Amino acid sequence: MTNYKRGIYFSLVLCIISFILYLPSLDNKLVWDDSDAINKKHYKYQGFINLLTPQQKSKKGNYYRPTVYLSYFIDQTLWGNNPFGYHLSNLIFNTVTVILLFWFIYFFFSNFKQNESSYNIAFISSLVFALHPMHVESVSWIAGRTDVLCTLFLLMGLLFHLKSYKNVVYIPFTIVAFYFSLLSKELAVVFIPLVLLTDLVTNHLRNKNNIVKYILYLSIFILYMYLRSKSFVNITPLSEKNVNVAASADILRYLDMFVVLVSSYYSYLYKLLFPIEFNAFISEVTKDLYYLVPSFILLTLVFIALVYSIIKRVKLIYYVILWVLISLGPSILLTLIKMTPTSLAERYLYLPSVAFAMGTGYLFYKYVFCRMSLRYSCVFITIVVVFYALLNINRQSAWYDDLSLWSTTTVASSNTCLPYNNYGTALKRNGRIDEAIRQYEYVVNNKNIKCRDAVRALVYNNLGTAYIKIDQQSKGRETLRKAMELNEYYHSPHLNLGIDYLLSALGTKSITDFEYAKRYFNNSISIRPNSGISHHYLSIVYKETGDLENARIHASKALEFGIPPAQKNDALRILDEIQNSDSKEN
């Protein structure tokens, strides 16, 4: 078999394995914030150029990821809100990434004149990457495709960069791939240091022709930052309010930051090496002594291995170590600043695992495949493949729906309130109100549960609506008011309390209840002026109390800001009734 045919054969095998492995995910539902992700309103698709530079700056979210939004738009056009299509896209993106990794590793090792073994190393490495259980969050979770798309285009860019050593015609393809990687996730900023690292290891760093390439790559990054600044006004700044440990002259605070840094790296490295413990919601880094001791030991060993490999010029070792450390850098930064509810996340390991897989594949080929008989080598790799595959498939079942996801997460994060809140919400959506109430009450009554006031307000809001659903109206209203006290900028308790008073007023025709409903809807609108649903319900209050002009105004605003289809029909009917009433008067 020629080398070219062997590469095609290996690519086909990897394609089949990676796709079949994640077939169970095709049955999965929309989980966590999937619905919000695929129905974002701050980007209305009017062509890809509008995604790059919207006519108006977005005031929602902290992300600028046009490639991801475009993928959602395509999926929505083809599949509507059917989860199958979105999961299918994730499987395809992941499979393409595996194939790109195979060819990247092949051309990487070909630079060391290892053409005959390059295909074998690339295949084993890509197989490890395809099976790694920590990728489940990125692939089985629709909103996790950001890391997959970012890695896909980043590997494509690195592959074209390797090809450009011999033919400069690949440079434009490298630039385009790098740019699309940036448009997929901010993590792609590591492309330039990874390019420099790759050139160093392959002995191309001192090539004068590369200066032009580096200038072009840097220019693309500057262009990206410019377009990002033009598209967003809500970029979270790095300030003392955001820093996990406030910046000050106090040496203990800097020491604490160092501890967080070390513990974060240890947590990620441990998950790469031993992918057996899973948690979809890690709210903070562990700082206990029993955790810090192995953290320092492992990182010390990594540092020693890095220094030794640099001194001895064992290029692959320091290439793998530096790739992992560099690609984890942006994720570690998220640990030090509070931009997301989760300090650590398994999906952040998708790109770093590229180097882990590369190193594992090389070591297996050199110390197992080349030194053992073919029979024992096959037995060894079969054991690893089966072990990884079973862990992977089992973890996919946790992402089937919100009930399965949050029931497992409450066990893994037993001292964090949001998993309990999300599990309660999943139970409530499935009609299991009493069980949902128990989850909410566990949070509000347990002082050992770590919960900020803003999050606790969310729990009280959900608990209040659950009480109302089981006809404990007074208890529900009291709980909703408690949510308002905890977070005065949270509009949902006002909205839900207004809805409760409106429903009561529609039954009793109580003017007092109508007035209470009006007050709370207006409060909700004052906090969130573009809340279409608040405007809709307020229009009903005005219509029922005879104020048709205000009913018309708020029904129109409800349609302008957007409301669900059922409420949209109600709003249109209200406008029609008002118009008919005006026609009769005329």
Image (cartoon, helix red, strand yellow):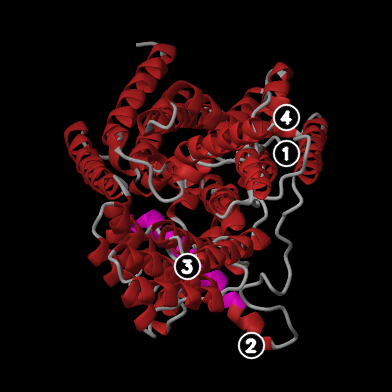
Residue beneath disc 2: 252
> In whole angstroms, how far apart are the C-alphas of marks 1 and 4?
38 Å
Q: Which residue is mark 4?
A: 50
**SS at badge 1:** loop
Q: Nearer the viewer, mark 1 or mark 3?
A: 3
Relative to 62, 350 lies left or right? left
Q: Mark 3 falls on what kind of element? A: helix
Q: Is residue 190 visible?
A: no
The residue depicted at 60 percent of the width and 50 percent of the height is 535
Disc 2 packing (10 Å; few <14; some 14–19; many ≥20) = few
Task: Check disc 4 and give the amino acid type.
Answer: Asn
Residue type at the position of mark 2: Leu
Q: Main secondary structure of the magenta part?
A: helix
Q: Earlier in the sequence, mark 2 or mark 1?
A: 1
Task: Give the spatial CA distance, label 4 vs label 2.
Answer: 47 Å
Gap in angstroms between the C-alphas marked 1 and 3: 53 Å
Give x and y (percent) for residue 249. Answer: 75, 86
**Can you identify the residue that label 1 sits on?**
205
